[in-house]
Image (spheres, helix red, strand yellow):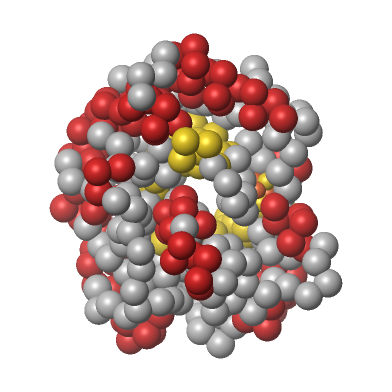
Amino acid sequence: MIVDTLRRPLRNLRLSVTDRCNLRCQYCMPEEEYVWLPREDILSFEEITRLVDVFTGLGVDKVRLTGGEPLLRKDLDRLVALLAGNPGIQDLAITTNGILLAEQAPGLRAAGLGRVTVSLDTLRPERFKALTRRDTHGRVIEGIEAVAGGGWPNLKLDTVVMRGVNDDELEDLIEYGRRLAAEVRFIEYMDVGGATAWSMNRVVSRAEMLRALERRYGRIEPLIEESSAPAERFRLPDGAVFGIIASTTSPFCRACDRSRLTADGLWYLCLYATRGIDLGQALRRGASREDLEGMIASPWRARADRGAEQRLAMAERRPLIQIGELRRDPHLEMHTRGG
Ligand code: SF4
């Protein structure tokens, strides 16, 4: 097993398959215009599969498909089938906004996808429209319910909580998740690249969320778990379990085994990293498996990234990257590196 300078193993790979998205969420893609990755740079499924194969040879055993919106990538089930054939992958999952999920879920399941996480920030269609600038809430709900009724294990619903936007829906979301046997996870609003409207005032902290939920449900118990997963899990007095991802006020960098590969093959060792390693170009120039292993193993051994912890230590926190820089290098956008 390869470990970094903080003894964190290389295990978890987030694979962005496209930088395109069919929503424009305030916390991720608030601008009118974006600079996209050149089409010819986007890796083919065969190229992605070859890179993933190198990663699994070095210890990666969890792969999550992300985007942008991954279901916008044509014939994604073909990639899923290729990855499902890799015996090193123990956990093959996807994070999606759900809009195209109802139609694609059966094919993805048949191809070997293991788990689904759907982003669901609100249960109210009008609010969804204001938050995402699209009128497709009904399709998201259809997608979630198709998965919930389709016998998939471990359906998760992820909610980015923003003050004054959806912080009055925590209870409704928990109750919705309960009805579908889905675990809801509340995510603190993060100051990642692309979150140009971020401000600390709009962050609802884990502590505040717990206080609000305790007022409604009574005493909430933390579940004690050994895990590198970002969500801390909690149990309500009636047994329902939910998660909180407190990346902004209580980062979990010390246990972070995640890295990210963009759709054009840049590999980032941290969500906040400003530079990536160009595995895609290396592959296209004919790098051997050993070359690629070296390009992955050496930087991982030297990895000291603790992006969110360093942000927390800053006296004055503003959006991470300004708009001009994001336009010059779209790799700095969260939607390019898969959140
Ligand atoms: S900020 Fe970087 S090191 Fe910290 S949890 Fe996120 S990806 Fe991992």
Residue at 58 percent across and 46 percent down: it is 275
Given residues 94 and 8, the one toward you in this image is: 8
Give the residue drawn at x 51%, y 84%: 165
Q: Is residue 289 visible?
A: yes
**What residue is drawn where x is 36% and y is 68%?**
34
Residue 255 is left or right of residue 37, and the answer is right
**In the image: residue 308, left or right of residue 241:** right
Q: Camera-side residue: 29 or 168?
A: 29
Q: Nearer the viewer, residue 59 or 150?
A: 59
Q: Residue 52 at what x, y percent from top left?
A: 41, 26
What residue appears at the point 47 percent right and 58 percent down from the top-left corner?
329
Q: Is residue 171 visible?
A: no
Count of numbered tags: 0
Apparent side of residue 328 relative to residue 202 in the rendered image (left or right): left
Give the answer, above or below, for where 31 lies relative to 10. Answer: below
Taking depth in this image into account, of 85 and 292 the one nearest to the observer is 292
Q: Quadrant of residue 196?
A: bottom right
Identify the image quadrant of residue 7.
Answer: top right
**Residue 142 coordinates in the image, percent (x, y):** 23, 63
Q: How far from the left and from the top, in percent, is residue 40?
A: 24, 43
Residue 9 rendering spot, x and y as whole percentages: 66, 28
Q: Is residue 159 left or right of residue 143?
A: right
- Report which quarter residue 190 is drawn in: bottom right
Q: Quadrant of the N terminus?
A: top right
